Amino acid sequence: MLSEHETPPRRGRRPALRRLPADRRARGAAPPAQPTVIPRPVSLTTLSGSSFQLTAGSAIVVRAGQDPAVRGVADYLAAVLRPSTGYALPVVDAPTGTPSIELDATGGSAHGQEGYRLRTEGTGRVLLQAHTAEGLSRGVQTLRQLLPARVEASTVQPGPWTIAPVDVTDAPRFAYRGAMLDVARRFVPVADVKRFIEQAARYKVNVFHWHLTDDQGWRLPSTAFPALNQVGASTQSGWAPGTGGPWFYTEADYRSIVEFAAQRYVTVVPEIDGPGHTAAAMAAIPGLNCDDRARAPTTASTCGSASSA
């Protein structure tokens, strides 16, 4: 039934179709979706025009006279892109006339220590500007996300390697952006620690909190107290002494991880637990115990239980 305010439809006539404005009819489909960048940048504007596309002749440009660290960021970017694209991507100090990615650390101080601006300029150039090499490093992580996901592959993949026309401006909201990895309770090999750091850096994490000691193991290298590695590193959660190990990082391992993190502008913060959560140390050094007798190593999986036993 119709209410008193409703008008009955006229028979034999179809409802009128709303006509789109002429410009929308000419364009056809809706405008392209805005690219997704994580974490969300301060500003991301989709531009008109053609996408930028890497080609076999593309280069990464770092003009002469800049901080040498900028060349390090460019080398890092090239190393990321070469395996999947199969392109040489040389790092050069002047444009080559081919589609290029240019890194420029002469941007104004308004960018701050970690801020950057990334802008595509038609098909010919992506310009990444910052005030510091660290800011360029954060922008490189955004550039990786703007490329097709297969760019992260370790073997050559099919193209095309395009970046939608965008203008991105970004700077961190929080100065400390950390991620923790607990290698004390369960040991993590060097290659996997580096992979963790690499993945964290992709999302602009700038602090690697490295939990190195706890009841279940002492992973920090020690030349002054070798028992910390011989005994304290002989266990991990679920593994008793004699079933493997010892599980600890050598000085060379530690140094290589710190250098790996520094190349990605990630600060390593080592955590050495005390006075609690020290059963691994108490098993290695008798003098840490009230009766000067070493306690048995623990493989407990309950956090902190061994130290309070």
Image (spheres, rainbow, N blue to C red):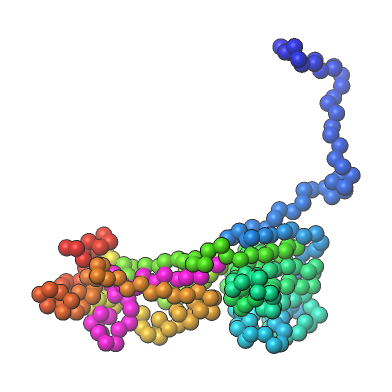
Taking 270 as reference, is 273 left or right?
left
Q: Foreground: 155 or 9?
A: 9
Taking 187 as reference, is 143 left or right?
right
Residue at point 61%, 78% (across, down) = 133
Q: Position of residue 62 (x, y in %)?
A: 70, 82
Magenta-drawn stretch contains 86: no
Magenta-drawn stretch contains 218: yes
Taking 180 as reference, is 175 left or right?
right
In the picture shown, does residue 102 fall above or below 41? Answer: below
Q: Position of residue 251 (x, y in %)?
A: 37, 85
Q: Where is residue 301 in the image (x, y as percent from the top left)?
A: 27, 61
Taking 288 as reference, is 149 left or right?
right
Q: Foreground: 250 or 244?
A: 250
Residue at point 64%, 85% (across, down) = 67
Q: Is residue 29 visible?
A: yes
Find residue 51 and report its image quarter: bottom right
Residue at point 26%, 67% (across, down) = 277
In the picture shown, does residue 126 fall above or below 255? Answer: above
In the image, the segment drawn in magenta is: 204-230
Q: For the view shown, which residue lies furthest in the front direction?
A: 110
Quadrant, the C terminus: bottom left
Find residue 109 and report its image quarter: bottom right
